[in-house]
Image (tube, rainbow, N blue to C red):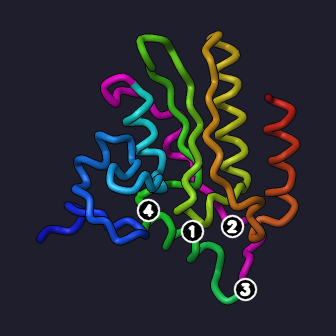
């Protein structure tokens, strides 16, 4: 059986993944809400899953050369390979129900959805885009907090994003 055809909920119910997606990632068997990432949110929210990703190539660096049990640069590389994401947030513009919409969606799978300098910058730029284009902005936050490996640089992102909002 190919991987990903079935989903087993915490209550042990087996659900066809296609059926689960049609039900917006809520198990029809037991009403369990499955954790989803930006790809699934974009598919649900953007008409026909058509959108333009903003700042899609922006990635985190390791300006502090941080190392605990592992180098931060290695953690970033591993997270990118595992999740196929560039960082813990994706920002995009598209149409939802025929109306323009800017979405910033965090992905918990990328280092716990932690907010580093790139996450803060991408959110700030998405807000700026929204303001400049008079377009509604939707933030889907699933964050584990500030990214410890970026120290004060990550803490400054709270002020940056709060000021923009």
C-alpha separation, residue under disc 1 versus residue under disc 4: 11 Å
Query: Mark 2 highlights which residue?
Result: 62
The residue at 84%/36% (across/down) is: 162
Query: Mark 4 highlights which residue?
Result: 83
C-alpha separation, residue under disc 1 versus residue under disc 2: 9 Å
**Which residue sits furthest front?**
30
If you read the primary sequence from the N terminus, does the residue marked by circle 3 or circle 1 appear first? 3
Q: Which of marks 4 and 3 is in front?
A: 4
Q: Is residue 17 left or right of residue 93?
A: left
Q: Do the residues labelled 1 and 4 touch (CB within 8 Å)?
A: no
Query: Mark 1 highlights which residue?
Result: 76
| Residue stretch rendered in magenta on the structure | 47-67
Q: Where is residue 119 in the image (x, y as percent from the top left)?
A: 67, 48
When asked about the image quadrant of residue 133, the answer is top right
When asked about the image quadrant of residue 151, the answer is bottom right
C-alpha separation, residue under disc 2 versus residue under disc 4: 19 Å
Q: In this view, does 164 lie above or below 78?
A: above
Q: Are marks 2 and 3 in contact (CB under 8 Å)?
A: no
Assign a secondary structure to mark 2: loop
Q: Is residue 46 above or below residue 133?
A: below
The residue at 86%/50% (across/down) is: 156
Assign a secondary structure to mark 1: helix
The residue at 79%/29% (across/down) is: 165
Q: Where is residue 63 in the image (x, y as percent from the top left)?
A: 74, 65
Q: What is the magenta segment's predominant secondary structure?
A: loop
Assign a secondary structure to mark 4: helix
Q: Which of marks 2 and 3 is in front?
A: 3
Q: In this view, does 123 lie to the left or right of 151?
A: left
If you read the primary sequence from the N terminus, does the residue marked by circle 2 or circle 4 appear first? 2
- Number of numbered tags placed on the structure image: 4
């Amino acid at each position: 059986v190919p991987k990903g055809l079935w989903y087993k909920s915490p209550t042990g119910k087996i659900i066809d993944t296609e059926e689960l997606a049609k039900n917006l990632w809520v198990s029809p068997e037991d009403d369990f809400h499955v954790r989803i990432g930006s790809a699934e949110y974009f598919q649900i929210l953007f008409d026909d899953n058509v959108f333009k990703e903003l700042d899609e190539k922006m990635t985190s660096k390791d300006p502090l050369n941080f190392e605990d049990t592992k180098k931060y640069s290695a953690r970033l590389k591993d997270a990118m390979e595992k999740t196929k994401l560039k960082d813990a947030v994706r920002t995009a513009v598209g149409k939802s129900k025929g109306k323009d919409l800017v979405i910033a969606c965090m992905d918990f799978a990328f280092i716990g959805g932690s907010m580093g300098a790139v996450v803060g910058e991408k959110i700030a730029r998405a807000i700026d885009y929204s303001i400049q284009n008079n377009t509604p902005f939707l933030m889907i936050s699933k964050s584990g907090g500030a990214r410890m490996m970026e120290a004060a640089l990550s803490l400054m992102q709270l002020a940056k994003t709060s000021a923009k909002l």
